[in-house]
Image (tube, rainbow, N blue to C red):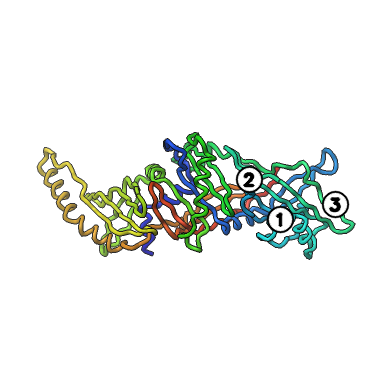
Amino acid sequence: MRTNGMRWWVGLVVIAIFTVGVSTVHAEDTPLATAVLLPSVISSIAQQLVPLTVDLPGRSATSSVQVKIATLVYCGTDGHGGGYAVGIAIPAESIFSPKPLSATDCHDALSAVAKRAIESPGAPNWIDAVRAELVWAPWQLKLALSDAAPATRQAATSAPSFAGIRTLASYPTSNLAVLPPPGEDRRFDVAFGFPGTAIVAALFASGRAGDPLAALAREESLATQTAGVPKQANMVVGAQYSFINDLLKLYAPEYEVPIPIEGMTQKMVARDVQVAGADNSMTATGRLVMGNLGYHCAVHTAGADLVITRIELNPIAQDCTSADLMERLQCQGEQLATSGSSQSVANALTNYYQGTPFHYSTGEHPLRFDLLDRQFTATFEALRSSSKGTTISEAARASIQSVAQSAEGMR
């Protein structure tokens, strides 16, 4: 597809957004990048987090019993700055698979949720309907149990008590290292917000956010700005141009460019690519080198959904002052050839790419991250790109899949 050819300019934009970690200096509490997870992708992640094993106190002071949360639905904001989910807990050894929970269960009493589950065919002797809270404060994300309602079959042993169990899991969200080499020494902090039915993650250079809660409140407004987001999108991501440029320097100082010119066999290499933008416009600049020919290149895009409008090429000046006559003549000849070819190559590139959306998808290079006791892979299909001020944003459809790992109980 024609859009695949634009990877030579934006091959790290999505990686920048998903794996933020360059410690760039910012004077104010502006995140380097922000991701807004919309309900459908949150639901997909929640369904893949179960079964989730939890250790509870047993009937004696020294014993314990394992239960597993077999189904889970994310409900949205709890009205107090956090988010909450509702789940069904069953005996760890049970093979019962409860019906998936829905938004309706979020608003019912836990006792009613428990009653419906225990009455399902094949249900075990007891179940617990549980409510779990997601709470973030600098710099810790906690999954905490806030309520539980047991249901037991007649004459069966009662359900184990969740009394005294508060924190199910706790994760530090500061000074994190997630980038692969050569960026493995970079650190970042992440803040989480839970507006409406979305989840917002704002990423900062480590130790640079003076007031992350205030910055997070500003970013949470993005969750309500979905008017121009395609219906297929389940995520909106954005990153500062300065941050993307840092990652381009780090990971893509040069890379090969496809040349859409019939009969052209030489390789063209892009170097020193940088991006800059304003409202509804963005320009990527860099150097293109093909053999002994070199050009300064600019790719101009514009529109509410950025599309390529024009590609400019200008010859890179060479120092043709060698004392050797033959070297000087060769240099001047190459300079003349570059000057003469720049416009024709620019026209060919413009004709080929003009009108192409400036999108990037991860394709065959999935991203990886860990959550609870599972590893996930994520692929990203960009659907709409936009530029506002110093930020580029993309509405996308993310596909997030868990990778099978050995499950261990949370303690």
Which of the image's four quarters has the C terminus? top right
For marks 1 and 3 on the same chain, the one whose residue lies earlier in the sequence: 1
Q: In which quarter of the image is residue 251?
A: top left
Q: Nearer the viewer, mark 1 or mark 3?
A: 3
Q: Which mark is residue 80?
A: 2
Mark 1 crowdedness (10 Å alpha carbons): few <14, some 14-19, many ≥20:
many
User: Is residue 180 visible from the viewing direction of this image?
Assistant: no
**Residue 202 placement (x, y as % from top left):** 51, 45
Q: Is residue 227 left or right of residue 281?
A: right
- Secondary element at image label 3: loop
For marks 2 and 1 on the same chain, the one whose residue lies earlier in the sequence: 1
Gap in angstroms between the C-alphas marked 3 and 2? 33 Å
For marks 3 and 2 on the same chain, the one whose residue lies earlier in the sequence: 2
Q: Nearer the viewer, mark 2 or mark 1?
A: 2
Q: Residue 158 carries which label?
A: 3
**Residue 405 placement (x, y as % from top left):** 63, 50
Q: Residue 86 carries which label?
A: none
User: Do the residues under discs 3 and 2 have CB atoms within 8 angstroms?
Assistant: no
Q: Name the residue tied to disc 1.
A: 70
Compare residues 231 and 43 and report the one nearer the observer. Answer: 231
Kind of residue sitting beneath label 2: His
Q: In this view, does 325 lie to the left or right of 111?
A: left
Mark 2 crowdedness (10 Å alpha carbons): few <14, some 14-19, many ≥20:
few
Kind of residue sitting beneath label 3: Ser
Compare residues 327 and 38 and report the one nearer the observer. Answer: 38
**Residue 179 placement (x, y as % from top left):** 48, 43
- Secondary element at image label 2: loop
